[in-house]
Amino acid sequence: MSTTTVLAVANQKGGVAKTTSVASLGAALAELGHRVLLVDLDPQACLTFSLGIDPEDLDASVHHVLTKGLDATEVIIETEDGVDLLPATIELARAEADLLTRTGREFVIRTVVADLDHYDWVLLDCPPSLGVLTVAALTAANGVLVPLQCETLSHRGVGQLLDTVHDVRRFTNPHLEVWGVLPTLYDGRTNHARAVLDNISETYGLAVIGPPIPKSIRFAEAPAAGRSILATSRTSKGAQAYREVARNLTTFSTARS
């Protein structure tokens, strides 16, 4: 039986530090000695860019793996952050249409991940929508982590995401669990941010995976360097917070296996 933990990082609302969280948690898990694969499922290829790879330079990407049957091992790239990456290009925008007519489209990512069981963690950076690719990611995952900006409007989409999770559990992946919410862009000086967090817990009954990730200009600087914040600003509060979240996720994963 595979011991790989497949975690979908999903929120159809953009601007919640989803890709930053995938890159940073991946690097933090690698620091802990885990073998980590990051999968960029966003046609904008933000994760691929942020790890120092120009999608324009790639001949093959996750699009070819999902729609053309190319072996993932031929596409996976080693990065300087100690994690492997299954990169995306703009071609992935066509994958939704290509997969719509395909039988078993919900299982395309699960099939790919099943052959990559030498990794301890596979983190799926879901696109900011609830389309075919997100459903396929949820179908492949053991758990879902929901990055959430601590602002009033940012959690309006959580209910829709949970409805999708409910459908996925019912039809394609009965074992899928929502691990919890990861608070991002957090300003601990405001009562409002704390109130939003409490409201999420009460409204949706979701665990809050802490510590909250603080708002910091350091996060904007990291992608420009093609590295995660753990490399560009090792001792910053943001880097330390992601390290702590990674440790909490490993504990969480062990408790569930």
Image (spheres, helix red, strand yellow):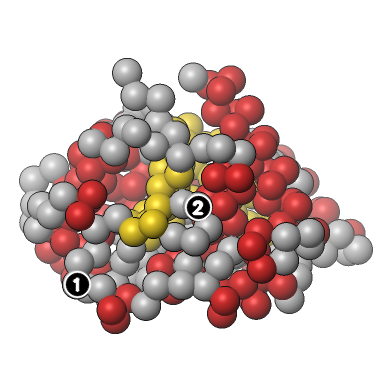
Q: Residues within 10 Å of mark 1 (few under 14, many from 20)?
A: few
Task: Give the labeled residue for mark 2.
Answer: 82
Above or below for 111 versus 222: above
Within 10 Å of the Cα at label 2, are there few (<14), some (14-19), or many (20+) other Cα atoms?
some
Q: Which of marks 1 and 2 is nearer the N terminus?
A: 1
Q: In which quarter of the image is the N terminus?
A: top left
Say above or below: 211 vs 99: above
Relative placement, left or right, of 89 versus 127 is left
Q: Is residue 128 visible?
A: no
Q: Are marks 1 and 2 in contact (CB under 8 Å)?
A: no
Q: Residue drawn at (66%, 68%), measured in percent from left and top?
A: 232
Distance from label 1 to label 2 (Cα)? 22 Å
Residue at horizontal 36%, vertical 43%? 138
Residue 104 in the figure: left or right of residue 45:
left
Q: Which of 22 and 133 is in front in this view?
A: 22
Please give the residue where the numbered disc 1 appears in the rendered image: 59
Disc 2 marks a residue whose amino acid type is Gly
What is the three-letter code of the residue carrying label 1?
Asp
Q: What element carries label 2?
A: loop
Residue 76 placement (x, y as % from top left):
30, 55
Going by the image, does 155 lie left or right of 199?
left
Labels in figure, total: 2
Front in this rendered view, residue 106 or 238: 238
